[in-house]
Every structure is written in C-alpha cells, then in structure tokens.
Amino acid sequence: MSRDVRTQLLLLPLAAIILIWTLLPFYHMVVLSLTPRDEAFAGRLWPDQPTLENYGTVLTQGDFYLQSFWRQLANSVFAAVMTCAIVLSVASFASFAIGRLKVRFGDAVSNLALLTYLIPATFLAIPMYQVMATYGLLNNIWALILSIATFTTPYAIWVLRQYADSVPFELDEAARVDGAAPLQIYWLVYIPLIRPALLAIGTFALLHAWNEYLYAFLMLSAEDQMTLPVAMGLYSRNDDAPWPVLMALGIIYSLPPTTLYYAVRKYMVTGLTAGGVKS
Amino acid sequence: MSSKVFASALVGALLLGTSPAAMAADLVIWWTKGVTEDEENALKAVVTKWEEQTGKTADLSFYGSGDTEAKTIAALEAGSPPDLTFDYAYDLAFSPTWAYEGRLADVSDVLEPIADQFQPSALKSVNMLNGETGERSYYAIPWTQMTPHVHYWKDFLVEAGFTEEDIPNEWQAFFDFWCDEVQPALRAKGERIYGLGLGTGSGGNDPFFNIHIFLNAFGAEVLDADGNLQIDDPEVRARVIEAVDSFVKPSAEQCVPPDGVNWAGSDDNVSFINRKNLVAFNPTLSIPASQLKDNPENYYENMRTRPWPMGVDGEPTPAMVSVKQVLIFEESPNKENAKEFMSLLLEPENMGPMLKGALGRFFPVMPALLDDPFYNDPADPHRYAMYEQFTTVENQPFLQTRNYRYAKVMAEQLWAKATGRILLDGWSTEDAIDELAERMHVLLDE
Amino acid sequence: MDRAWGYILLIPYAAVFVLFVVYPIAYGIWLGSDVAGYERLWDDPIYWRTVRNTLVFLIVGVNLKMLLALALSSFFVLPYWWVRVVGVLFILPWAVPHIPSILSIRWFLNSEWGMLNNLIWQITGTFGPAWLSDTNYAFACVIAVHIWKYLPFWTLILIAGRMAISRDLYEAATLDGATPWQCFQNVTFPQIRNLFITSTLLTTIWSLGDFNSVFLLTGGGPAERTNTLATLGVRFAFKEADLSAGVATMISGLPLLIPLVILLLRRLNRQMAE
C-alpha cells in the first residue's frame, strides 16, 4: 500500500465525522418532512411510510397557518430583490463618488460606513424598531428592506472600493478625454469593470434579506406582510404545529438561497475575501 | 448578471408589489390570531357588517400570540397605537399599568348600557385605577375568561391498572398518586412516560397561572385585599413556601418531563397531546379542542377534564380567573369608531359564534351565551367540566386587579425565576422566596 | 464638475446613513440615558448571568470555532478529489438559512420526542439527557449550534488564505527536511497569522450579535439562564415592555464592543494601505 493511499485511509474517519456533524440537522429535516403528520413524535431514523403530502400541504396552502404561503414567498422574493437593488445602486454610486470622483472626506465616509458594518445589527434592533414606528413603516415590508439595505450597503461600498482600486484608471481617463460626463463614465466604464464584485455583493444582499429573521420578526407581523422566516417562527409557536409540515416548508424556503449560493460560490469567496478579510 | 436581466428582475419584483399600508382606514384593529379559521372568519364577518352599516373602512390584522403585545408596546412608545386590540397577555402583564398611566381609553360608554349582560366579576376585573385621575373606571372590554383546567389520559390510567375512582381528591395525594403510583406502573410496562405535565418555564404564561392555583390551595395570600404586599408576614410566607414546595416537588422528583423547566407557551400542549405525560394543567380547553376534528375518540373517550383537587383546608381550591381584554388607547386616532365597533361586536349574536369558533376553548363572560348546550351539555367531558368550574367553584380574579403593579411580577416572570432557582440552581425554597420577595418589594412598593 | 457629481452620487448613501444609522443611534443613546434601566440591570441576577454567558460564548465559542476552522483548513487543502466533495457539502450550514436548520436541531434534541433521545431509549432503555433544559447542556448546545452554523464560513476564509501562500516556501521547507507540523508552524501559520487574527476579531464582534443561535434553540431558557446580551435586550424591550432596560443591556455590551471595533478598524485600514 502506497503511503498516499494510507494517508487517505487514515483521513476517512475524519471525513466521516465532518460529514455526520454537518449533515445530521439536514438529514433530520428531510426525515421529518417525509414523515406523516401523526408520526411526528415517533423520532424514527427513517419513516415507515415516507410521504410527500407535507410538501403538498405547503404548496396548496392546506393548513390554517399556511394560508398565506404564496403571498409570503412573494414577500420574501420582493424583499430580497429590492434590498439587492438598493444596495447595488447606493453602494456603486457611493464607491464611484469616493474612489473615482475623489470627493472630499471620501475616506471619512468610507470609514464611517465600515464602522456601521462592524456594529452587530442586533444591537440596533430596539431603536431601529422605534424609528421605523416613527416613520410609519411598521408591518410594512419596506421596514425590512430598508434595514437590511442599511446594514449591507457599508460592506458593499467597502468591497466595491477595494475592487475598483484594483482596476485601472486609464479607461476612465480615456473616456474623459472623449468628453464623457461622470454619469456616462459610471454607467459605461465603471459598472462593467466592477461587475464581478457587484455579482458577489448582490448575492450577499439577496441572501441577507432572504434569510433575515430578527428584524423581519420584529417589524413584520401581519400574515400577508411577513416573509417566510417570520411565518415559520409563528408556525413553530402554534399550539399544535405539525412539525413535518413545518420542516417541508423549511426545505422549500431553503432551496432558492442554497441553490443561488452554490451557483455563485466562486464569486462569493473571492468577493468576501477581497473585502471581508484580506490577508 | 447583465443589466437587462437585472432590470427585468426589478420590474418583476415591483409588479409583485406590496399593498400600501392601510394608513387611511377609519378603524385599525390588531387581533391575536385564533386557532381556527371559523373564529377568524367570524370576526371578519363582523368587521364587514360594521363597514356596511357605517360606510367606513376597517383594517383588521391578525398577529401571532406574543407579536401583538410586542407591536403594541412599541406602537404606544412611538405614539401610534391601534384603535382596537386584543391579546391574551394584556390583562396579566400590561393593561393595569397602562390604565394607571392614563394610556387606556375609558370605555364606560360602551359597557354601562349593557352592564347587566356581563358577569359582575368580569366587569370588576376591567374596573381599573387610573393614577392620573385617581379614580377607577372601565378601561377595557371583557372578552372571554380562562382558568387552568386539569386534563388526564383515562386510557393510560386504565392501562396502569387503576380506575378514575382511585384518583385522590386531596391536594398532595392527588399529585403523588400520578407520580408515585401511575408513572411507575406504566414505566414497568415499558412506557416512556412522565406523570405530570406541570411546566415551570419562564417562556409562557401557563406556569404563572398554575403557581397561583397552588398558592390558593395553600391559602397563601401574597397581596391583601387592598393590594398591599404581605409576603413577609410569617404565616403568609410559610404558606407560600409550602405552596412552592408542592409546585416544584414533581419536577424535582423527575415526575415532570425534564424539558418542562423550559416549555414555552405551547410545549405543554404538545407533550400531553402526544402522550408523553399523563396530566396536563392548561388555562384553556385548547388541548381537548385540538383533538375534536381529527381524533374525536381522544376528545370523547381517552381524555378527561376535572377540577383541581381540594385545597389543604379541605375546601375546593379557588380558581384564578383571567378575564381577557379588548383595549382602546387614549391616543388611538379613531376612538369613537372603535367604541362603535365594540358595541356591535359585543352583541351576543356576533360574539357568540366567534367564541364557538374557538371550539369552546374560552369561557364566555356573558351568562346569556352560556344557556347553550354547546357549553352546558353534561355529555361533553370537557366543556361541561369547564362550565362546572366556572359556575360552581369560587373564582378569584388575578392579583393584578388588586394592585396594578402586580402585572410587573408577571412580565418579569418572578415566580418562574424563583422556581428556577430551586430546580436549576439547587437553592432552598426559603432563599428563593427571599429573592422573590425582595424583587416584589421593588416592584410593588410605592 | 466631478466633485459636484460626486456629492450628488453620495446623497443616497448619506440619506440612508442619516435616516437609518444616525437617527436610530441617537434615539438609542437617548433611550439609554435613562438611569432606571441600568439600576434594573444592576439588581437583576439574570443580567449578571447573561454577562457571564456572553463572555463564555465569546471566549469558548469563538476560539473553539476558529481553532477548528484552522485545523479543518489543513484537511480541506489536501489535493484529493473526495476531499473537495466533502468540502462542498461542508459549506451547507452556511448556505442554508438559520431558521429551518436551528428548528430542526431543536426538534432533534427534544428530550421527550427528539430523534437523539429516541435512539438512546431504543438502545439503552434510559431516558437520555435533557439537552435543551439542563442549564449546562443547553448552553453547550447553543455554542455547538453557533459553531455548526459559522464554522464553514471561517474555514473557507482560512482556506482562501492558505491557497495564496506560495508553493516555493513549502518546497524549500521540505528540502530542509521539515515535518508537516514544522511546515505548518514555520510556513503556513506565519503567512496567515494576520488573516487569522483579523478573522477572530471580526467574528468576535459578530458573535456578540448572534441572536438566532440562542433565541431559536432555547429561547433563552430554562428560566432565562442561556441568554446572551443580544437576546436579553430584545426580551426586556419586547416581552417586558421595558425599553430602557433593553437598550441599557445592549449599551452595556459597548465597553467590550468598542475596543474590538477600534482594534479591527486600525488593522483593516493598515492592510488597506499596504
């Protein structure tokens, strides 16, 4: 047996431990979601008669607590897309102004932004809630969109600045010589150049808004205004919540972000390491 | 992502849109979500009726239990409360304080014309002190009432080799019976089961209800009739300690599922319904009611509801009744509309179906509604037990009605914290009660 | 002209900043200036318990997580195809949203009907531990969930850092007869030291704000014994209608948070300048 094969064999138990640790909660989620409702408490490793009916219940809104499922899915999509759009436009404007147009105090703005990024959002939850109430935005999906955009934009500005600094200024200069106005440079030169970074932070913002629980839970309460995670939390606190259906809902809710994440995984890692933590 | 794809995604999202917040409605209602569609539809029907009668618009939102209170707290702070709201926690934790601070609208003009339709005790519970005027008045509308009930699995009892006649009716003997007789008998047969579903957690309201029944059973009056704290009185203190000892004993002796120390609102229901323990103590009939549709044999055959065992003095244990309230705030923009709507909702033909839609989980506060086989049919093993509990046993309102500050004791979950000291930190009951009394003084003394 | 456009393009961000950062912070400070909130905290044993929990969460949870990430990064840089497959699956906890995963874990660990204790019952005939209601187990589970959720991300970051190390350094070390451990000690770690420290600071700050791992798993119980500052503050504000105590709880975390943030800002700016 070659040394290399032996090393690999020795590593297998480690790989097994990693996989069990990582996948057990998902395995459990899948098992429960395939379990008939009245066997939820059996705690079996695999249901005797696996069924897809829990998924059907979710998709047909076939439960009192699921009567707004499609509406809530649409809310989640809306919140994610709008957050993404706001973050991308606000951050690309700001990073362009600071990095390319060299506004005065640009570095100060950028540092302030960074500071916002570093404060855990949870610490601002109480005043943010009050402020949203003052703006009359409570129980309005825009409260969620605006808060997540607020917490994601600073990071986006920072990543975009770092990324933009690494792309040459010559194209800007050339365009300027041709008589392009700043807005034209922004749209025709800057945006195409930073597209990979935009993709990374756009995905980041999208996922952030889709996944957010605390702010959504605090700010959205009516069933037709809430996003899916809030609906799941509400459902789980119900007196006789059918957990198999809840887990089916959880899987349906998790599929889009997980797929998206894997689709753009390469960009995410580059984007996050470019900005988040540079060695 | 090309900008075209992005743009079309944006447009798509905009089309999905959000309905504009119903700022302009003439009546904004925040109601805690019910358990059945019927209940919700009954309220919606009354809202529609009101809209048709008056030509005004109403905006009705249902929130989860716990969410309504959180939203209302913040909205009050921001000066934008709803016009009308209902939640299960108001009477226990909030409205006495709000009434005292002058934040609730006086609803005497709604209640007084129909006062004779309510049970006097229900009216008394909404007659709250306003600290600004120094006078009592009606600051909430009584909606339903609840008191903890005792449920048990009759079929498990039989399986363990006992009959219902074997269940003792003396206080401590009752609990010991399930822990020392039935639980071991069933475990010997290989059942994975606990005796009592007597949770002690701080995440829900049920333990707060139950501990007060225990206090009643031992005659421990934490507040005197005028609402003064008398927990330091040696005799009261001794009784409180006995009551708390009795309350934690089953947990300490592993007769309550270990997760009972951390059950939130619904976990005690879940545990009992799924036959993980033998006896449940729950302030509504939600446990049997949940079985009515899909498992009627549980409702009619296997589950039973009974009164609490006799207190230590040999008399029936007085029940603690919590009268659930509908509130209108002083700062509500449409107080008159809210009152008008409440007058409509309180008409028995509107209120009755809504309470029935909740499958009889709650007990009406209007005697007229009780003259109905839905509640007083002796063949119904649960609703009839509730009927008897409310009509034959002495009922006491919660201590919040004696001293509005007692609501803080509920909000801070002082009793659950004290039992936690004993069960989790191994404190003596005396020390736990000392800590509790100290905090109570801070909260209750002027 | 450029400058003018620059300011115009900064307006959206400035608006967001003023409306949703400056105003809430100012409002928070105003709410936090109420002494009653701090008096309540000072007298509340649950608060001190929470402070202790938060420190344990940060010191044990964060360090354990980062050390595991460092160790696992050594595994995931190995050049075998199946290691890459394991790596792809390993990312799942990070990619899947919090709420379904943590709810699944909560059900799994339920002492009465969860899968784990059911297995223990079937195999040993005993009831199994109360994972989420024994105070010590419950907080250990909270930390485990936090690590489960965030370990993949930080492992990924460290892997990226290691990938950037020049192969020449390793070849030189191997020629000198260095063992794998010596290679790690003398080549790998010095190269990613900066990254490791920055990451640890960053995750310490973020972990201070981790609401979900506690709230969704134990809800802060039993008897409020597994709260961290983040969940206790929210509880005071929204469950007990005591806004000043809620804000005071959050503000009391600032003496820990601010030095960390300053330290980190300095490091990041230095690295940016390089």
Image (spheres, helix red, strand yellow):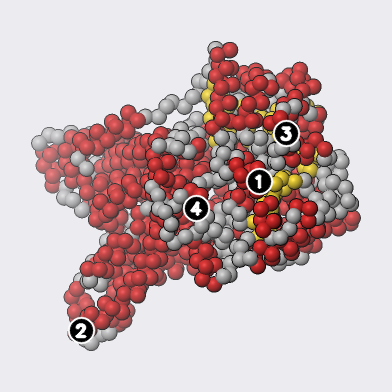
Q: Specify the amino acid type for callout 3.
A: Asp
Query: Residue at image x 13%, y 47%?
Result: A170
Q: Amino acid at mark 4?
A: Glu
If you read the primary sequence from the N terminus, does the residue marked by circle 2 or circle 4 appear first?
A: 2
Q: Which mark is residue B327?
A: none
Q: Earlier in the sequence, mark 3 or mark 1?
A: 1
Residue located beneath label 3 in the image? B377
- Mark 3 crowdedness (10 Å alpha carbons): few <14, some 14-19, many ≥20: some
Identify residue for label 1.
Answer: B301
Q: Quadrant of the C terminus of chain A?
A: bottom left
Horizontal side of residue A8 vs B215, given as left or right: left
- Where residue A62 appears, as percent x and y from the top left, is 45, 37
The answer for how far apart the CA atoms under marks 2 and 3 are is 83 Å
Residue wearing tag 2: A2
Q: Residue flagged by tag 1: what amino acid is it?
A: Glu
> At x 24% / y 37%, what residue is drawn?
B6
- The nearer-to-camera label among 2 and 4 is 4
Q: Residue at x 35, y 54 (%)?
A: C95
